[in-house]
Every structure is written in C-alpha cells, then in structure tokens.
Image (cartoon, rainbow, N blue to C red):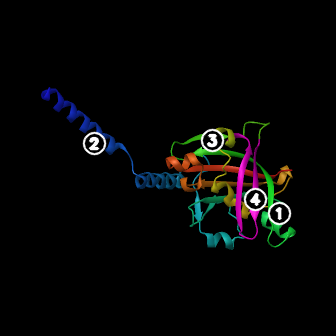
C-alpha cells in the first residue's frame, strides 16, 4: 500500500507545483497589460500609430487633440488615453448644471454608438455599430457641488452583453470635455484606451485593457 501511496503523493505535489507556477500574479497581469497597451500605441490595425501628449499640452490646445497627428492625451491619475474626434456642438453637463443653480445635480439621458476592442486579443468584443435599430442608452448624473459624474446603462448592448447597468469610469472620463447635443450631425465622438482599473467589471477581473470608439448624443 505504501509503495502505491508514495507515487500518488508525488504526482499530486507535481500537479500542485505546476498549478502554482501557471497562475499569474496580479503584478504579472498588470505588466502584461502595460506591454499590450505600449504595443498598441506603437502599432495597431484599428487607428494606427498614436502620438501621446501630456495633459499640459492638451490644455494648451484648448482641451483638444490633433486627429491628423493621431494624438491621444494620457491622464496620469488613471492611465486613460483619450482622443477627441469631435467635441460636439451643444453644451457640457457642467454648463447645463450652472444654468440651473450653483450646487445642482442634473440627470440626462445619453445615447451612445460604440465599438469595444480587446487590446490583448486583438478583436472586437462588443459593438452596436452594425445595428440600425439599437443604440445604447445611459442615464448620467452630474453633481456640480462635488463635480462628479455617475451613470447607469438602461438599454442596449453593454447592458445585455455584461448584464450590468454599471457604466465604466472610462466612458465617463470624456464628459467633462464634450458638448452634448441632440443634433445627429454634430454629436461628440471620442476614442479611448481604457486600462482594466477604469473598465468594465469583466475587464477589471481579468486585467484587460480595452480600446473604445464612442459617440455621445443627448437623448430626450
């Protein structure tokens, strides 16, 4: 019996050691995420090589990015990269709140067309661009007192795909700079690189960086 038991124990030990070796640490996954983002910045099949600019340069350019040079601004606080393709022709949520009162909170429905691209795997994981009848909707709240944005998906592909109403921080980041309008011909559009810490719950859990193209239109 002992002769049979020892080989079994040895096999189990080998299997346990292999499992421990194969399991990546959070630090290792973050390192791979950064490497994937760096490769994407240099070369990709979606938007092309990217010129990264600082927040200081972004502000000096009237909070705009030069699309001809394919500029993306890097926000140091959360690692989000953003390109403003079109700022829009309406008003920012900040301006809308100020029109009501100095400490007001406003709620607005925002309609979004989007494409979500997994930077690590190099594939589109979710989009509503090919559906003429479905546009994603989110209810967004802006508190002028705390200067914070919160939102929840109420309809669309993001809600059904992830089964979560939670709107990632990455989707809210551009709202400070966008002028929202109902005019379909002059709506705001951005491109984003969103690290896992500002992404969906799925991206956060699996340390996945995502690239997004999103348009923002003021709903009714």
Give the CA separation, mark 1 to mark 4. 15 Å
In the rendered image, the quadrant that contains the N terminus is top left
Q: Which circle, 1 or 2, is nearer the viewer?
A: 2
Q: How many numbered tags mark residues here?
A: 4
Residue at numbered disc 2: 17
Q: Residue at x 61, y 46 (%)?
A: 46
Give the CA separation, mark 3 to mark 4. 21 Å
**Residue 199: x %, y % from top left:** 59, 52
Task: Find residue 164 and report its image quarter.
Answer: top right
Badge 3 or badge 1: first in the primary sequence: 1
Task: Find residue 22 and report its image quarter.
Answer: top left
Q: Which residues are magenta?
A: 135-157
Give the CA separation, mark 3 to mark 1. 30 Å
Check residue 127 for magenta coloring: no
Q: Which circle, 1 or 4, is nearer the viewer?
A: 4
State yes or no: discs 2 and 4 in contact (Cβ < 8 Å). no
**Residue 218: x %, y % from top left:** 82, 53
**Residue 47: x %, y % from top left:** 62, 50
Looking at this view, is 81 or 175 the one in front?
Answer: 175
Q: Residue at x 12, y 28 (%)?
A: 3
Taking the image as shown, residue 37 lies to the left or right of residue 134, namely left
Q: Give the number of the disc on residue 91.
A: 1
Badge 2 or badge 4: first in the primary sequence: 2
Give the CA separation, mark 3 to mark 2. 34 Å
Packing grade of label 4 (10 A; few <14, some 14-19, many >=20) is some
Residue 146 higher or lower than 194, as above or below: below
Residue 54 visible? The answer is yes
Q: Give the number of the disc on residue 141.
A: 4
Residue at numbered disc 3: 162
Q: Which circle, 3 or 1, is nearer the viewer?
A: 3
Residue 61 higher or lower than 108, as above or below: below
């Amino acid at each position: 019996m002992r002769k049979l038991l020892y080989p079994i124990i040895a096999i189990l030990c080998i299997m346990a050691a292999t499992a421990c070796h194969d399991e990546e640490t959070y630090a290792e996954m973050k390192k791979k995420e950064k490497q994937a983002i760096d490769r994407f910045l240099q070369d990709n099949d979606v938007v092309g090589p990217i010129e990264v600019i600082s927040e200081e340069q972004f502000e000096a350019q009237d909070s705009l990015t030069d699309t001809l040079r394919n500029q993306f601004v890097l926000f140091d606080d959360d690692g989000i990269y953003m390109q403003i393709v079109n700022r829009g022709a309406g008003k920012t949520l900040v301006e809308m709140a100020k029109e009501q009162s100095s400490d007001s909170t406003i709620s607005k429905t925002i309609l979004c067309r989007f494409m979500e691209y997994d930077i690590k795997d190099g594939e589109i994981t979710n989009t509503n661009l090919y559906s003429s009848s479905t546009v994603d909707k989110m209810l967004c709240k802006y508190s002028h007192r705390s200067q914070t944005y919160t939102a929840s998906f109420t309809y669309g592909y993001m809600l059904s795909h992830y089964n979560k109403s939670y709107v990632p921080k990455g989707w809210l980041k551009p709202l400070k700079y966008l002028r929202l309008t109902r005019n379909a011909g002059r709506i705001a559009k951005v491109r984003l690189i969103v690290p896992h810490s500002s992404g969906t719950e799925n991206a956060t859990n699996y340390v996945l960086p995502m690239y997004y193209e999103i348009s923002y239109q003021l709903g009714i």
